[in-house]
């Protein structure tokens, strides 16, 4: 190894160049690194010469087309001393070769981030590095961090390296890059900071193995303890132990060996190099190697008091069986070797759940078994408040749905809808009632909800032969298609402007009412102050309208207010909405959403947002009916907001596709072939003839 110390791998003043820097991962990591320590001087990516990686609040990074071009154009004092490779596996060899052939004596270390590089390529990379007299780490390394100098290469520390790494005296060397971060966080509970955090990588062939890094850590003056995270595969640890046995005063080692659980199963740890290829390369084999070197059994937290004395007699270190034992084991090791803490220990490592829902069990359980609910840190607290605490609707739980359904089942004897026998529903229910069950996953609460939904479907059947969706069915009939094609043509002719307004209205109602503590949309006495809601809504609407007009762009209109047919009077009504409203009044059914829409239509005119009272159209009525049914389920988080928003469009489509079938049957019986064709005399060409 060329480096004679850990600082030889990375120190303040080192200059870094990044391959494939415009790639998604490379650009993101480089931006964070530049904000943290500003040590990247340039990057290169084929075909990207002249571009820049912009760094908010930091030095932006110039991009060159090739490494040689970068070395030629950069002043000698700005040429890189370190190279980090983010290239795809097939391009790694070419990029490293290019860098070393055009090195000009500047580059001292190469870090290969890329994983799953073939053994043949890694062997060639090792030969290139040896020939070029440079060190090479990887492949599949996450990089390195020198905490005292506040510099890093790669993604060690994630997006917040200063939060994860406090300067101190523990050097972490890990096969897994993410475990460097995890262990650094854990050790803060023991009052230990970090001198260096090093990810060796864990592809099949580790280019700079533990036996080369351990002596550097042993000689490092700022390091008093070495912490290792080890995975199965390879003889690297056995070679390292043999190397440090020859040292006179080795520093204590704290080690965790992962993966023994996988030995009896067909389970992969996720790293290409975690492949057992002999008895000493398994997790249990490596545990035995370390236990033999330390001369004491693995740390047992239940008997932690005996370990300071035990470690005093055997000062080489100790192995832990679980990650959370790292903190008490480190504390015992510090006591045995008289290692001073780097700072006051932070809060002890413990389970601090953000949510605990034990119900009645909380009173029955002993106090020490009831977890303390920890305060949620930002930015998560704000997200939880928005999505969990104050928001409505269930958060979707994603899983594979292949050959599975919550909505339907059939055991070979009885088809079911959300667990309810379809044959029983056929005997006692109705089509509308069953559709609502299928769409909501829960039966309706009130009998009148089914009746109102039935009326909504009827209202959606048709608005005459001139509507776009009716035209779709008639065009299909005129072309000689079958009924199913005509019904698909009807569905294909509805969209966000024709039929989709109901979903926009549902989104509007959820935005307006989500923070009003509304629970029962049918309880007039518990309704929020609708006039205040209308006034605030119209005020914001007029602001957006004014800004849009000043910018010369269209403004977003209020969905489901107004209708192109019913729009000629000072006060306008959609007759279909009137029927639904009249039935509700006669049966003394209150719906807060429909009440809001009626007040909104009048409030828009009264506050001079419109010149007339627009009709609350049938899409609004349909939406208000469905939101009345869905709202209690949203409040109880039994359905998602997305499902509630989709309901009006689904209802319109269901009613209109039945209406389209009626238009098809009529047109097929009474129309003539191709009679929907527009005559040539009525068609206009708006371009210019070219021949």
Image (spheres, rainbow, N blue to C red):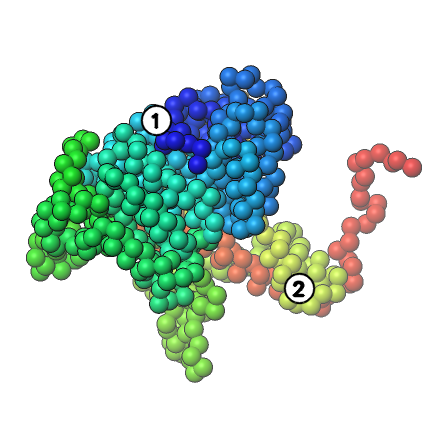
- Which residue position is annotated with label 2? 485
Q: Viewed as shown, does residue 270 lie left or right of 18?
A: left
Q: In the picture, residue 604 is in which quadrant? A: top left
Q: Earlier in the sequence, mark 1 or mark 2?
A: 1
Q: Secondary structure at mark 1?
A: loop
Q: Which residue lies most toward the bottom here? A: 413
Toward the viewer: 660 or 349? 349
Q: Viewed as shown, does residue 639 lie left or right of 551?
A: left
Q: Residues within 10 Å of mark 1 (few under 14, many from 20)?
A: some
Q: Quadrant of the N terminus?
A: top left
Image spot of residue 85 (x, y percent): 52, 37
- Which residue position is annotated with label 1? 150
Q: Which mark is residue 403?
A: none
* Residue at screen point 41% across, 54% down: 234
* Residue at screen point 27% across, 29% down: 221
Q: In the picture, residue 219 is in which quadrant? A: top left
Q: In the picture, residue 442 is in which quadrant? A: bottom left
* Residue at screen point 54% across, 28% down: 43
């Amino acid at each position: 190894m060329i480096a004679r110390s850990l600082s030889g791998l990375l120190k303040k003043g080192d200059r870094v160049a990044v391959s494939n820097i415009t790639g998604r991962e490379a650009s993101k990591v480089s931006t964070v690194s530049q904000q943290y320590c500003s040590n990247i001087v340039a990057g290169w990516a084929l075909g990207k010469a002249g571009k820049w990686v912009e760094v908010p609040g930091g030095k932006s990074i110039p991009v060159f087309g090739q490494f040689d071009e970068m070395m030629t154009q950069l002043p000698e004092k700005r040429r890189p001393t370190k190279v980090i490779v983010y290239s795809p596996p097939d391009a790694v060899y070419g990029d490293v070769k290019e860098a070393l052939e055009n090195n000009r004596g500047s580059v001292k270390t190469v870090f290969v981030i890329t994983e799953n590089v073939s053994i043949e390529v890694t062997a060639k990379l090792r030969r290139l590095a040896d020939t070029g007299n440079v060190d090479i780490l990887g492949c599949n390394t996450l990089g390195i961090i020198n905490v005292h100098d506040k510099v890093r290469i790669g993604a060690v520390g994630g997006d917040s390296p200063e939060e994860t790494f406090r300067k101190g005296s523990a050097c972490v060397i890990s096969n897994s890059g993410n475990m460097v971060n995890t262990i650094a966080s854990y050790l803060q509970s023991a009052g230990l900071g970090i001198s260096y955090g090093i990810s060796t990588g864990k592809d099949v062939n580790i280019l700079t193995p533990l036996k080369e890094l351990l002596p550097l850590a042993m000689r490092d003056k700022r390091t008093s303890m070495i912490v290792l995270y080890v995975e199965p595969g390879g003889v690297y640890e056995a070679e390292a132990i043999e190397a440090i046995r020859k040292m006179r005063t080795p520093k204590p080692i704290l080690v965790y060996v992962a993966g023994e659980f996988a030995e009896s199963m067909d389970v992969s740890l996720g790293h290409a190099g975690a492949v057992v290829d002999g008895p000493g390369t398994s997790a249990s084999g490596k545990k035995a190697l370390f236990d033999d070197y330390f001369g004491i059994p693995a740390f047992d937290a239940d008997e932690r008091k005996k370990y300071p004395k035990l470690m005093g007699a055997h000062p080489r270190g100790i192995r832990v069986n679980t990650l959370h034992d790292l903190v008490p084991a480190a504390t015992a090791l510090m006591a045995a070797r008289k290692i001073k803490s780097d700072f006051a220990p932070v809060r002890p490592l413990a389970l601090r759940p953000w949510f605990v829902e034990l119900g009645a069990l909380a009173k029955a359980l002993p106090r020490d078994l009831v977890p303390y609910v920890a305060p949620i840190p930002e930015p998560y607290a704000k997200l939880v408040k928005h999505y969990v605490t104050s928001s409505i609707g269930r958060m979707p739980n994603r899983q594979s749905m292949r050959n599975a359904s919550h909505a339907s089942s059939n055991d070979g004897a009885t088809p079911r809808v959300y667990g309810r026998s379809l044959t029983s529903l056929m005997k006692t229910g109705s089509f509308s009632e069953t559709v609502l069950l299928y769409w909501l996953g829960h039966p309706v609460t009130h009998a009148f909800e089914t009746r109102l939904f039935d009326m909504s479907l009827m209202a959606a059947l048709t608005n005459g032969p001139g509507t776009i969706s009716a035209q779709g069915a008639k065009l299909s009939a005129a072309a000689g298609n079958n009924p199913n094609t005509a019904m698909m043509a009807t569905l294909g002719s509805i969209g966000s402007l024709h039929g989709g307004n109901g979903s926009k209205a549902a989104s509007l109602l959820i935005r307006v009412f989500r923070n009003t503590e509304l629970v029962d949309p049918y309880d007039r006495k518990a309704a929020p102050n609708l006039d205040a809601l209308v006034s605030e809504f119209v005020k914001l609407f007029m602001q957006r309208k004014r800004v849009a007009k000043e910018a010369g762009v269209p403004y977003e209109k209020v969905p489901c207010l107004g209708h192109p047919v019913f729009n000629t009077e000072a006060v306008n009504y959609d007759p279909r909405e009137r029927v639904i409203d009249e039935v509700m009044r006669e049966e003394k059914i209150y719906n807060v959403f429909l009440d809001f829409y009626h007040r909104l239509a009048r409030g828009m005119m009264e506050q001079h947002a419109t010149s007339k009272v627009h009709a609350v159209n049938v899409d609004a009525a349909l939406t208000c009916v469905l939101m009345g049914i869905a709202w209690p389920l949203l409040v109880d988080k039994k359905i998602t907001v997305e499902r509630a928003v989709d309901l009006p469009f689904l209802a319109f489509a269901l009613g209109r596709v039945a209406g389209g079938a009626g238009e098809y049957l009529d047109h097929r019986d009474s129309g003539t072939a191709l009679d929907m064709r527009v005559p040539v005399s009525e068609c206009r060409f708006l371009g210019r003839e070219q021949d």
